[in-house]
């Protein structure tokens, strides 16, 4: 009868676990210097570990040039296997650390400034009051590879991520409408379909994407003049508030008494998705934050319903908007 692997006292991978870690760092950093910094070694020591690993395995795994590190086919195969092990160890140790208190720990959330400020911040008190030992780390990034590499636990985005290790849940709909500040209107007059060519716009790279979704916005902008662009949602909103031009903002900005919604047949509907690494949802803090976000950003939120609603009277949003935006 075969014994369980754990009963075998021999380490089947030999004596080069440390070298394997250094090799994985090289594969990810694509440079020896970057890998050495990641694992806390000198560049010379890291190089020796890679050579020692290749000698032990008997195969060339990586080549170093002035352009960086390039994996051989065998190196790529080993790196993929090590990445899976690294992810499993991370998930296991993260859950073990939380066993002493299943509602204690850090949860990393990837979210844009706009959604974080306008929708999550007003409701965060509910989460922090009930779970004071959960630390929510909000990061600005929109790359599902960060989920796969365990850099973040949850991500709020505008597309469903289709990957065997990820689960995406459809949330509500973010409505982007044309806004101008009252200051802008005082200076340039009220924009209408007839005089739109005389007006000024604020644009962004995202809004300029070649997709049918953005066609209503682009058809209007092309008739006017663009003076500023910004890919930062916060800076973009502040430009519009300062009267620099007309722009696209979430419908919730109708709470701003100095903002005017323009009736120019431009409503961009963006579906919201909450994506998580499936394994991380087994962690209670991650699941708690996941469910909290789902309750805040779901279609039951009147600002995120299928149809535009500009008459929402939610005291949390009203108070928060006045405090954050209107000072």
Image: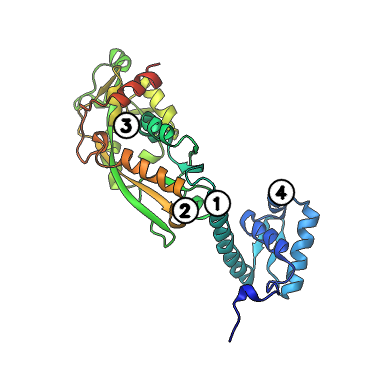
Label 1 residue SS: helix
User: Mark 4 or 2, which is nearer the eye?
Assistant: 2
The one nearer the camera, 181 or 302, is 302
With 97 as the anchor, is 188 left or right in this view? left
With 231 as the anchor, is 194 left or right in this view? left
> Which residue is identified by label 1?
94
**Crowding near pointer 4: few (<14 within 10 Å), some, many (20+)?**
some
> Which residue is identified by label 3?
248
**Crowding near pointer 2: few (<14 within 10 Å), some, many (20+)?**
many
Q: Do the residues labelled 4 and 3 touch (CB within 8 Å)?
A: no
Looking at the image, which residue is at 40% across and 16% down? 327
Q: Return the x and y of residue 127 as percentages of the image width and height.
A: 40, 35
The one nearer the camera, 64 or 270, is 270
Q: Which badge, 3 or 1, comes first in the chain's sequence?
A: 1
Q: Which badge, 4 or 2, comes first in the chain's sequence?
A: 4
The one nearer the camera, 319 or 8, is 8
Q: Return the x and y of residue 121 as percentages of the image width and height.
A: 40, 30
């Amino acid at each position: 009868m075969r014994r369980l692997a754990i009963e075998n006292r021999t380490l089947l991978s030999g004596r080069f676990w440390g070298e394997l870690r250094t090799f994985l760092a090289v594969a990810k950093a694509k440079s020896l210097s970057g890998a050495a910094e990641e694992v806390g070694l000198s560049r010379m020591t890291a190089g020796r570990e890679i050579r020692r690993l290749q000698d032990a395995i008997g195969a060339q795994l990586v080549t170093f040039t002035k352009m960086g590190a390039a994996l051989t086919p065998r190196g790529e195969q080993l790196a993929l296997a090590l990445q899976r092990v690294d992810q499993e160890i991370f998930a296991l140790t993260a859950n073990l650390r939380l066993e002493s208190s299943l509602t204690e720990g850090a949860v990393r959330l990837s979210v844009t400034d706009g959604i974080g400020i306008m929708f999550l911040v007003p409701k965060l008190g509910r989460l922090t009051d009930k779970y004071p030992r959960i630390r929510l780390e909000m990061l600005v990034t929109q790359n599902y590879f960060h989920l796969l590499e365990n850099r973040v636990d949850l991500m709020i985005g505008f597309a469903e991520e289709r990957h065997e290790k990820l689960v995406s849940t459809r949330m509500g709909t973010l409505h982007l409408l044309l806004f101008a500040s009252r200051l802008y209107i005082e200076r340039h007059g009220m924009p209408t379909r007839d005089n739109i060519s005389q007006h000024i716009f604020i644009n962004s790279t995202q809004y300029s994407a070649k997709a049918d979704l953005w066609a209503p916005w682009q058809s209007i902008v092309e008739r006017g003049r663009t003076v500023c662009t910004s890919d930062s949602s916060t800076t973009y909103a502040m430009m519009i508030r300062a009267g620099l031009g007309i722009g696209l903002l979430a419908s919730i900005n109708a709470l701003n008494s100095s903002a005017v919604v323009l009736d120019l047949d431009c409503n961009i509907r963006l579906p919201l998705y909450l994506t998580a690494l499936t394994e991380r949802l087994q962690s209670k803090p991650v699941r708690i934050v996941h469910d909290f976000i789902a309750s805040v950003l779901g279609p039951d939120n009147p600002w995120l319903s299928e149809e535009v609603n500009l008459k929402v009277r939610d005291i949390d949003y009203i108070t928060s908007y006045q405090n954050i935006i209107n000072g």
